[in-house]
Image: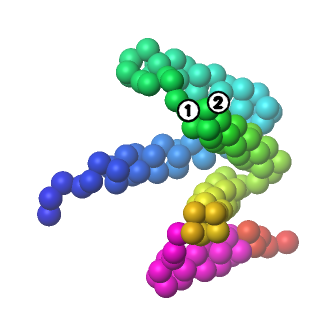
Amino acid sequence: MGFLPGWLIFAAIALVFWGITGVTQKLSTNNISSELSFIWFAYAMIAISVVLALTVPMRYHVRPLIFWLAVAGGTLNGLGALTSFTALESGGKASIVISLISLYPLVTVALAVTVMHERLTIMQAFGIVLAIIAAILLSLEPS
């Protein structure tokens, strides 16, 4: 068994970071507003961005389309984070809210198939069906 590909290692690290994040977000929104939680989240992102800007050589001159796609991605990511804080503050259980919002790749897949004309295998389509079933089962709570 050789080394794992770099992308898989980074994906696993992201999985751990985001898994812990769900708990920290719920704990913070139990004690402060979702808006204040989001502001502190944004401050942390700014700090990370400043460190990257100062330490990683980057090409800052990119085509306008690429710039605006990056801005749109950051904006959508921020709005997703804000609404996830609000869902947690509104009484959502971390185990359910984070599991449901973590199904966002289904939106990505739908857009990739319709906009970029990517194709799904039968196994991938089956995985999507299972993810949708999981979302439905997760959202069912006893009255």
Query: Could you tell whether 125 is left or right of 101 in the image?
Result: left
Residue 96 at what x, y percent from top left?
Answer: 68, 60
Q: Tell me the amino acid under the disc marked 2.
A: Phe
Residue name at image x 73 percent, y 69 percent:
139
- Residue at the disc numbered 1: 63
Query: Could you tell whether 21 is left or right of 34 in the image?
Result: left
Q: Are marks 2 and 1 in contact (CB under 8 Å)?
A: no
| Relative vertical location of residue 143 with respect to residue 9 in this rendering, above or below | below
Say the numbered circle drawn on residue 14.
Answer: none
Q: Nearer the viewer, residue 142 or 64?
A: 64
Q: Quadrant of residue 46?
A: top right
Specify the quadrant that holds the C terminus: bottom right
Residue 75 at what x, y percent from top left?
Answer: 70, 37
Q: Which residues are magenta?
A: 118-138
Badge 1 crowding class, 10 Å Cα cut-off, few under 14, some 14 to 19, many 20 or more, is few
Question: Which of the two discs, 2 and 1, labels the residue nearer the N terminus?
Answer: 2
Q: Tell me the amino acid under the disc marked 1.
A: Arg
Say the numbered circle drawn on residue 41.
Answer: 2
Does the magenta segment cover residue 119?
yes
Colouring method of the image:
rainbow
Q: Nearer the viewer, residue 44 or 74?
A: 74
Main SS, magenta residues = helix
Badge 2 crowding class, 10 Å Cα cut-off, few under 14, some 14 to 19, many 20 or more, is some
Q: CA distance from mark 2 to mark 1?
A: 29 Å
